[in-house]
Image (cartoon, coloured by chain):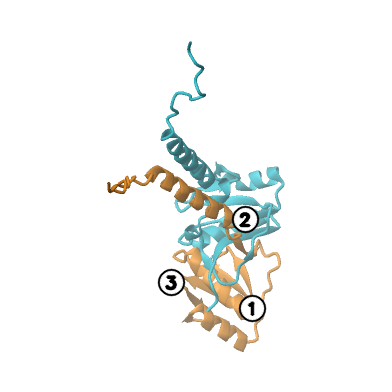
Chain colours: A orange, B cyan
Amino acid sequence: MRLEPAARRLRAPALTALVDVVFILLFFFMLAARPAPPRALELRVDVAGAGVVAAMPQALILAGARIAYRGQRLSPSELAVQLRAERAAAVRLHADPQAQLQDLVSAFDALRAAGIAAQLSAAAP
Amino acid sequence: MRLPSSGRRAPVPAEMLPILNVVLLLLGFFLMLAQPGTALRSAELPRSRSAAPAAAGSVLLRLHADGTLEADGRVLPQTELAAWLRASAATELQLQAPPAVPAQRVLALLAVLRGAGAQRVQLLVSAEAPP
């Protein structure tokens, strides 16, 4: 007598258990990943003339990352080049009403990269 | 004579256990997302190439896009900012503001803080790779 091999029963994969494992993995990697520490810029603003140097050049930050300086409209890096040519070690920055915070930060970055200190002023130029 | 049962209990609804597991994992997942430390979203911060790691332990000020100011978790009118700072005796602050907020508003805020005794104010930014 020939015996037929028993037919294998196909079991549907347990989807819930699979989702379970996926969530455990997700949880593990989210816990293992350390969030990047926050970064910050230290901003100094002058108040009522305290620490203000009269001879310090002044520039006005405009919208669109442009800067008005001595009648010219410059990019932050062009301003840095100009100030270095004038051997200025610091500049006082004012902000136009249309200028955004990102414009201020971009100017701050370019000046710092050129080694020029930026003194912020809340007063009108 | 009745023989004692072989220890078999009533069938446990085993298919419920993975479902419960998933539900608990989802709960833990959302609890982890709701941690206060994750409130800082880099998309809401200006981008900077020259930022340094932020100092720990500073008091957080949040300036929202609509102009409202939140100090240490509660909404604060601009007129009460100086009084609040003097009362809190905080000298180190961190300012979180969206990149599209007017720069003049931020400068005015910094001037008020400096005038009220803040010695160090850091603007929170998201790091951008140098060119």
Instruction: State whether residue A83 is above or below residue B25.
Output: below
Amino acid type, residue under disc 1 in the picture: Ile
**Residue B57 in view in this figure:** yes
Distance Cα–Cα, label 2 vs label 3: 25 Å
- Badge 2 marks a residue whose secondary structure is strand
Furthest-top residue in this view: B1
Marked residue chain, label 2: B
Q: Which mark is residue B94?
A: 2
Q: Secondary structure at mark 1?
A: loop
Instruction: Report in which chain the residue with disc 1 lies.
Output: A
The residue labelled by disc 1 is A116
Q: Amino acid at mark 2?
A: Gln
Is A120 on the left or on the right of A67, as rendered? right
Mark 2 vs mark 3, foreground winner is 2
Q: Position of residue B4 (x, y in %)?
A: 51, 17
Report x, y in % for residue A42. 64, 64
Task: Determine the CA span between mark 1 and mark 3.
Answer: 21 Å
The image position of residue B93, as x and y in percent, is 65, 54
Pointer 3: what residue?
A64
Q: Nearer the viewer, residue A4 or A28?
A: A4
Mark 1 to mark 2 CA distance (whole Å):
23 Å
